[in-house]
Image: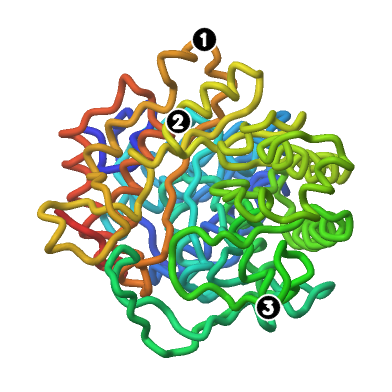
Amino acid sequence: MNPSLIPLPKKYEALPGTFDVSTNTKILFTNDFGRKSAGLLKEYLNVGGFNVLEPIVLSPHLPTPSGTIIVDVKGSSVYDSAGFADESYRIEVTDGTCRIGARNSEGATRGVQTLRQLLASNTSTLAGCRIEDSPRFRWRGLHLDVSRHFFDLAQVQRFIDLAAYYKYNRVHLHLTDDQGWRFESKAFPRLHEIGSKRNETLIGHYFHKPHKFDGIPYGGYYTQQELKELVAYADLREVVLVPEIDIPGHMQAAISAYPEWGCTPGRVGVRETWGISEEILNVEESTIQAMQTIFAEVMDVFPSLFIHVGGDEVPKYRWDTTKRVQERMAEIGVKTEEELQSWFIGRMDSFLQSKGRRLLGWDEILEGGLAPGAAVMSWRGEEGGIEAARLGRDVVMAPEQFTYFDHYQRQPVEQEPLAIGNFTSVEKVYGYEPIPEAIKDLTDKVLGTQGQTWTEYITTQDHLDYMVYPRALALAEVAWTTKEQRDLEDFRRRLAVHQQHLAAIGVKGCWI
């Protein structure tokens, strides 16, 4: 029987022998390409209490000593047009030796996480085995909304590390929304000085009327230095942080700080309720330039090839009823508000391309015409992803029916913590197939899939854990393991083991 690994590896073969990890264990790497992964392995082993020595380079002229973990990385990474490298790896455990082999650091680091899981099953002894593994999809993402409720640096690091443990390679940070701006801007400091703070927060569900509020000021933001530290933390784990600044809607917090960017005179406050604000950006050239300046700051912090611009849920009422916006539409030659949004996104697309980056947006950016370089994250079902793939664009499938972790997950929902609505069980997530039948001949356009965690109703670390786990484990297997290998009953068996592992480190998931 395969060990209780999640996601399930492509090939597992039991071998005779065992390998004991102890304070005498040495970590060797065959060349400098393996230094990073070897250092991460040392960090994990020391957290586990083994206190192993600093990794050293393996001398080619000396025999490999017993009790050694060898990290053998062949070379540097070669990236495709979407920014992905080969993540395949191989592990061989025999008497006295454990070897992790990979073409590059990405693959070796996935192997380190597998070794970490093997050790979690038996705290010091590895059974002899040979594992050959590689992912099904390139984009395996987890999203975290830090705008509606703020999570501090240590909490986000924990989120990243757990994502890496289950071989996610993208963590998408939703940094701005109507209810809070979380990114320090040195060019426009009122964004974080004013836009990061709301006077109070809604109590109960948005649909419960009349609305009641807690009367407690709420805020928080990340400095650029803190975010750079997050980027480095994620990079060590070969996880790319994908930043999102949501435009031109979901911008009430920004407009509260800079009213001249809005469509109506006077100052609005940071939104204190959930739902969709009618406050959206105007389309003056000065506003476009301001947004480009902000995205330039974002790119200085985040090296991610893809920069997420949101583009979702943009109410057109302000554009439709504001005389100056209508005049501006005539000036730039667009006839409808949908075309205006496409023009706006197109300006950002050109700017990002000029900086060597790629624009990513929610599927609403298809409306009015898709910008030339844009990729699409499909959340309102799969239709947007199907359309984008047929246009020859890269797609990340993130349909809310299967990948939204802010939904209820257990029946009866009345006994569950407050959630936004709908019902998405771990079994439903596990059964998701990211390649729709309609584009089965365009599989190369589907980069992968992503799980979303929106935090209107998630206020604490424990509640975040409860909503994300174990559904994130189910999606991890969907994203990594071949469709033919996946088996719900076997997943449940392995999940029971992981429940114990995660509970032991304080992860309070929704264990069923």
Residue 78 in view = no
Assess whether mark 3 and mark 2 are in contact (beta carbons under 8 angstroms).
no
Q: Nearer the viewer, residue 433 or 208?
A: 208
Q: Amino acid at mark 2?
A: Asp
Q: Amino acid at mark 1?
A: Asp
Q: Amino acid at mark 3?
A: Arg
> Residue shown at 36%/75% (left/top)?
460
Q: Nearer the viewer, residue 36 or 324?
A: 324
Q: Quadrant of the N terminus?
A: top left
- On the image, numbered disc 3 is attached to which residue? 267
Q: Secondary structure at mark 1?
A: loop
Within 10 Å of disc 2 (Cα), the crowding (few <14, some 14-19, many 20+) is many
The image position of residue 492, as x and y in percent, is 18, 41
Residue 194 in view = yes
The image position of residue 443, as x and y in percent, is 53, 18
Disc 3 or disc 1, which is closer to the eye? 3
- On the image, numbered disc 2 is attached to which residue? 133
Label annotation for residue 441: 1
Task: Decide which of tag 2 and tag 3 comes sooner along the chain.
Answer: 2
Compared to residue 433, the image places residue 361 above or below, namely: below
CA gap, disc 3 to disc 1? Answer: 51 Å
Task: Decide which of tag 3 and tag 1 comes sooner along the chain.
Answer: 3
> Residue shown at 46%/45% (left/top)?
167
Compared to residue 169, the image places residue 244 above or below, namely: below
Compared to residue 193, the image places residue 104 above or below, namely: above
CA gap, disc 2 to disc 3? Answer: 55 Å
